[in-house]
Every structure is written in structure tokens, then in C-alpha cells.
Amino acid sequence: MNSLYFTLDLASCARFRTGLIAALFLVTFIARAAVPTTAYSISGTYETSYTCGNAIVCLSFGQGVVNPLAAATSPLTDYATLYKGLLSSSTVSLKLGLSAVGQVGDRAGVVVAPGASLVSLSALGTYTLVTYKNGQVAESHLVDAAVLQSLKLLAGNSRPMHLEFIAGAQFDAVELVISGAASLAYTLNVYYAYKVSALVQQPVKGLVSKFTGSNLSAYYNTTITPVNPLISVCANTNVTNPENTVDTDLTNYARFGTFISVNCPSSLSVKLEGLRTAPAGYYAGFMLGSSGLLDLSVLSKLRLTTYRTVNGVRTKQESATGANLLDLKLLPNGQYQVSFASTLPFDEVQIEQLDTAAVLNNLNIYYGFGVEPSAFLGTTRILSDFTPATATTKTSTSVSGAVCAGCGVTNPQGAADNDPNTNAVLNVAAGLVSTVELKVALNGAGAAGYRAGMVISNNTGLLDASVLDRLTLTTYDAAGNVLESASGSSVLSLNLLPGGKQEIAFLTTQNFTSVQLSATSTVGLGVNINVYQAFADNLAGGTITAITPLPVELTSFSGKWVNGATELKWTTASEKNSSHFVVERSVGGDAAYQAVGQVAAAGTSSSTRTYQLRDAEAATQNMATLYYRLRQVDVDGTQVFSPVVAVAVGKLTVAASLELYPNPTPDAQAVMMNYVSQPAAGSTVQTYSEMGQLVSEVPVAEATARLPLPKLAPGLYHIVLRDAAGQRLATQRLVVSGR
């Protein structure tokens, strides 16, 4: 049987919307829903069973199920108890009916807590989760031994954790079966069974290295570039099956073999599907696989580089390496995404080994990609972002175990305030078994099924399996009741963020309002961790599963100044269900884009189409440079923006400009103004706040005069000179600094 336990995760990162009409593809990532649906074992239905291979031994240790109704009714804080006896070959089970039917793709599981006597994996026996529909077995899955290790880590603190798998069939009941000859007697508390719908992510745009045909060699390249110029020949590329990274099967992979030499780094580059270009701002990277847990150290041993080919000329765009630039995202299927946010368009991605680190040996490379930043974002994120004045009341700390000098939490409010640069510090000294805990309230409630987690960094620079096995996350409700916990590298999901920060999180089964991080030291191993924020979000991740072409493939967009106006021209190679184009103009800076014209599209076409529009009002903007973009509108209302085109304006038709002094000024009422060229009679000077509110409006007087402004609070203001018709002639920014 397959052993299953899934955590769905992608790192959070800053959203960057970029212009796009270059031919892209729609990429669907697994899982994110607004609010997952839940059902629990509160229907009052249950079944128990118990068999024993040695009646005398079993009778002596009183094995079986006690108080099963507590796990089959509310509240969810009550529990049944399963007893497993010493050296007895026996089976004990508890089957719990759900209040609603679970669907394919739902998380199916039970929430349990180990008794204090659970001291080793050998004491566990075999755990199996079974789902039923209408009394018939739907599925049966062994619980992974690594997950049981996480269960052992929680032994003694009575904190519940979940055992689960992703359902492949409908179910209305979940059963936990414990069998085998346990070496030690122990108890297990079962709180409830559940079904929680998986998070479902909305489609995102992107490109992958996927091509058809029998000869794929044109779409990938493997090279070794000697670092030492005295070395002219390197043995081989050390990349096996590179064609697997560009075929249509996204489960195939190439492999970096054992690193040859630091003087001969290997690299693999792949083209993006259709030889098309991903725009600036898209994330460039690779889907990887490794037999071990990749961590921050691996990011300094890999380099990603983007390229672009224009008119047959291949040009290097940009590179990234190290934890300050690269993202590393752990996915539920044992794969990883390594990527960085581009600043230039690209149609090719390259990965290089830069070190002899063993973790890079036999590294699997599935495919390259360029995807929009929304692929790494949830639709909802709730943070511990309180004002500094209230942050001190939103945390609590504790220290338990052996007496430990120096153990504790420094600056706990740093994990609860709204300043991302402040943090708390959890410190547990090595040599003694002690636990330090920091509990942080959320500025809102996380829904059942959301991730619960902390943004942290480890002062040793690494957050590997040995550290994760000493960390525990726990959720609480508004009344302060413990809800559920997750501990260890097999249960906690991990994201490594640029700048050295990391997210640790787990998927929840109940609504929660606080998250607690517990760190435990062992003999010879301490823990020193910075905690920046607690969070709840509906972020999830996975591999690419579906690709669909976008409506329009834009091959060019240009603009130029001709006879006192801007002429804009664009060409499409193909269109599908395209309605129209809207040309939009901005004067730059923080000015908004305004529509200046609309052109009907071809609808559906597989041939080249050319469009143009003349902006006759461009000269009235009184700007040396104007900025244009296209807003392509599909027949169903979908809108996509093109890259921005800058157009240098010819001779300006307005003859006025405005100077302000002093600027900045401590007193707005003392500002003087000077017109370099006197505007026509009837002109006015307007003052706007930074929020766009009109503060004052006065008529133009002599060429040099005091500007009659009201008393203004410190801040940024916009001074606008307009003619009698209301047309803008000149603008200046005024900074009021205050005294």
C-alpha cells in the first residue's frame, strides 16, 4: 500500500503585476480555495473492534477502546482512548461516521494525541487509515513511519495532531486501525475524524519547457564552462537524459550526476514552450527533486540564469544565486521549486551546479518554467500585524523542562507588531532538554483548512530536518484552547524566502486565532530562532497540471511622434475570441493610465493582424515623454495588459513652466512661485494633496509672487498650473516638512 501524508505549500512573496500580451499559456497549480468546507465526526455514529492473539496478555493489560462516543459527538475537545497492550499481537480500531460526505480530493483523517508512555516507534505497531462509503471500504492507506515519528515527538504533551491522506473516492466514515505486536504498552487519544476540502488554486499564467516531436535537442542545451582559463577541456556535461526536461511528460526528469570538479560546473538550459517569451516580473526557475531535504545551503550552490533570443541572437538576461535572491519551495510530492523574480523578459532558463555539495548529487530536474507571481500567492493572508502599542498584549511565552540559564524569548512583541523588520528571538541552550514557547495572536481568524505558520529565520543559517524535528506549531481558539499541533520535518511544510527568512506551516482542521511555536533543545543541540510573524493563509502548491493558450499572441507594440501626435502600432500573430484593444496613456510617475482610444479586434484569427491608433491629444499633456500600453479585452471580459511603450514627445506646444522655492519648505504659506514663461490670462494654480484631494485654487498673478497657499500639514503636495480651458500646462511637487 502507499503511505500518504500531504502538506500543500508555496512560499509567500510580493505580488508584481506586469504587462502581458506576449503569447503565454495558462498554468493551473494544485489547490487553493477561498474557505475550505469541513465535516466532523459529530453525527454520533461509531464502531469499535478489538482482536487479540493472546487472550491472557490482552486481558491483563485491558486493551480496547474506551469512551468511543466522545470522538463521535461534539465538542471536538473530547476524546476516545485506544489501548494497546504489551507484547500482544492484536488489532484495535475506531470507525467514526462524518456529518457530511467527503469528496474526491478532500483531506480525510483523524486527530489524535499520544499518551505519555509512547516512547519509541517500536511501540506503535502499524497504523492504517480506512475510509468508507455506505458501509463499504472506499480506500485504505498505511500511515507513513515518518509521520508516526512526528507523533512520537508530541508524546507527553497531550497535543493533538492529524493523520490524513488525500481521498481518491467519496467517503462518509473514517477508521483508524492499529495492529501488530507492539513492544510496549501505550494509549492513544482519538479526538475526531474529519473531511476538509483541499485548497484549490485559481489558474495562473506561465510557460513551461514542454515540446512535442521526436527530436528535442533544439530545445535544451548542456554545457560545462571551465572556471579556470588554464583548463581547456572538461570531461563531460554530467547531465543525463536532458531531453526529459523538454518533453510533454512533466514527470520525466534529467539528472545532475556526481559533481566532477569545481573547475568544471555543469549546466542545463531549456527553452520555454512555443519558443515564446515570459515578461519581466515573472518567476524563472526549475522543478527539482532530491532524495534529501534541501535547505538554505543549497541555494548558494545553484545558479539560475535567464536568456532571450531576438532575431537569432541569444543574449544573457540576468542571474541569481544564494538565499538572498532565490526562492526554494517544498512541494507535497517531494519535489522543489527553485526560482527568482525576473526583471527582464526571457524565453530560456538555465540551472548550474556551483559546488561539490553531496546534496546536489543525483539531483532530478523535471522542467523549467516562467510563471506569474500570483502562482506563489494565496487569496487570503491573516497576519499578526498589530500596532506596536498593542503588540505587547498579543503574545505569551513559557519555558519548561530542565532549569536552563539563558533560555527564553527576547522581544516577544516583535513577532506581533506590524513592522516586518522587528522580531522575537527564541533561545534554548544546548545540553539540557528544555522547551521554550512563543504564542502569537492573529489579527483575525484563520479558517479550518488554512495553513497556520510562522515566518522565522535560524541564526545558524540552516533550517534542516534536525532543526524541524525540534520545532512544534500549535493552534489555539479564541478561548485559549489547544486545537492541534504539528511537529517534525515530515509534517511541517517549509518555504525558504529570499533574504534568509523561512516559513514553517501545517494545514489545519479547525478555525484558529493564535499560533504557537515551541522549540526544544537536546543534549548537544540548542535552538536559536528569530520569529517575525505568525500567519494564516490559503496558499497551496503543486505541479503544473493543465495548459491552455491565451486569446492573443502579440508580436510587436511600438509608438513614435509624428506631426504633433503619437502614432501607435501593434501586430498579433494569432487571436482567439478577442473583442477589442483599448489604448491607454500615462504621463509617468504615479499618474494613472487613461483610455485614449479603442480598436476592434479580429475575434479569432490564425494569421498576422496589424492595428494602429493616433493620439492627437498627446501634445496637450505638456510632457517630454508619454507612456502607452494596450488593454486587450476578450469576449468574456477577460483583460490583459501589454508591456509599456515610452514615446519621446516633439516640440511642446505650451509655453509655460512653474518653479517653486523654497522646496522643501517648513511653511507652505511662505512659498514663492516663478513662471519661466508667463501663461495666458485666466490660468489658475491648483494644489492637490497626496491623496488627490483639491486643497486650493488661485488665479495666476505676476511672473514672480508668493503662492497664496493655506497652512498645510507636513506631507507631499502637487502644484498644477492650468490654462483658462482647464488644460494642464505644468506641474511641480511641493514637500512641506514642518518645523
Image (tube, helix red, strand yellow):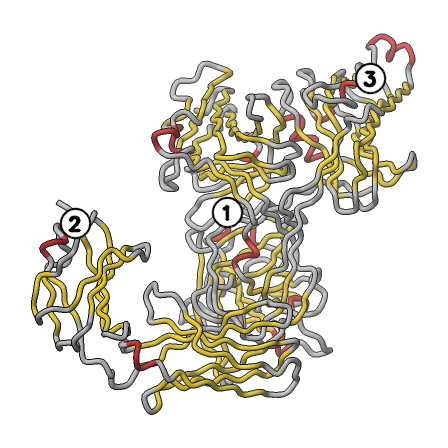
Which x, y percent locates residue 84?
A: 80, 18
Residue under numbered circle 3: 65
Q: Residue under label 2, please give it.
A: 711
- Above/below status of 509 relative to 351: above
Mark whose residue sits in front, 3 or 1: 3
- SS class of the residue under badge 1? strand
Kindly report the distance in space between the C-alpha atoms of the residues bearing marks 3 and 1.
42 Å
Q: Is residue 60 above or below residue 194?
A: above
Question: Which amino acid does the dot numbered 3 rest on?
Answer: Val
Earlier residue among tags 3 and 1: 3
Q: Amino acid at mark 1?
A: Leu
* Residues packed near mark 2 inside 10 Å, few (<14), some (14 to 19) or many (20 plus): few
Rounded to the nearest angstrom, the CA distance separating label 1 from label 2 is 49 Å
Q: Residue at x 12, y 61 (%)?
A: 707
Identify the amino acid type marked 2: Lys
Q: Picture coordinates of residue 629 (x, y %)?
A: 45, 74
Residue ID for mark 1: 496
Q: Are there few (<14), some (14-19), or many (20+) residues within 10 Å of tag 3?
A: many
